[in-house]
Image: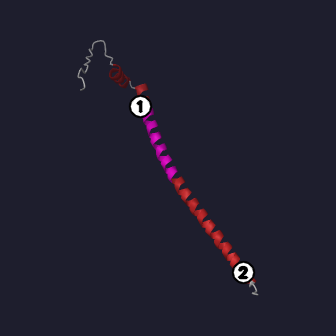
Amino acid sequence: MQTINWPKFTSGIFLALFAGITLWAGVFFLQMHQELTAQRAQEASNRRRLDEALAKLNEQRKYLDRLQHDPALVETIIRKKLGYARADEFVFRFEDNRTTR
């Protein structure tokens, strides 16, 4: 019958336990790092989209301000989109009578 060398046996168990915990911690931190990288990429994408939306909003505010304070712009838009003319003007409209074959 063999006798167990208890100090080596307990050292081996602790070493195996330490290796297992270290491996688990390494995998855990690797997953967390990958998730953090993905979250940072998503944040960068969201920031770009936010910047684009804010730029578009700023352009729309400027256009709205021009519509409220620039009568010449309003007149131009009404003339182009609605086909209005002044009392002393004539508007000629030409229809496209070509048929598609």
Q: Is residue 65 left or right of residue 87?
A: right
Would you call the spot at circle 1 few (<14 residues within 10 Å), some (14-19), or many (20 or more)?
some
Magenta stretch mostly in which secondary structure? Answer: helix
Q: Is residue 11 magenta?
A: no
In the rendering, at what x and y percent does residue 62 appear? 43, 33
Residue bounds of the magenta highlight: 41-61
Q: Is residue 41 left or right of residue 90?
A: right
Residue 85 vertical placement versus 21 (above, below)? above
Marks 2 and 1, the one that precedes in the sequence: 2
Q: Circle 1 — which element?
A: helix
Tag 1: amino acid = Tyr
Tag 2: amino acid = Phe
Would you call the spot at circle 2 few (<14 residues within 10 Å), some (14-19), or many (20 or more)?
few
In the rendering, at what x and y percent does residue 85 appear? 31, 16
Q: Quadrant of the C terminus?
A: top left
Q: Which residue is mark 1?
A: 63
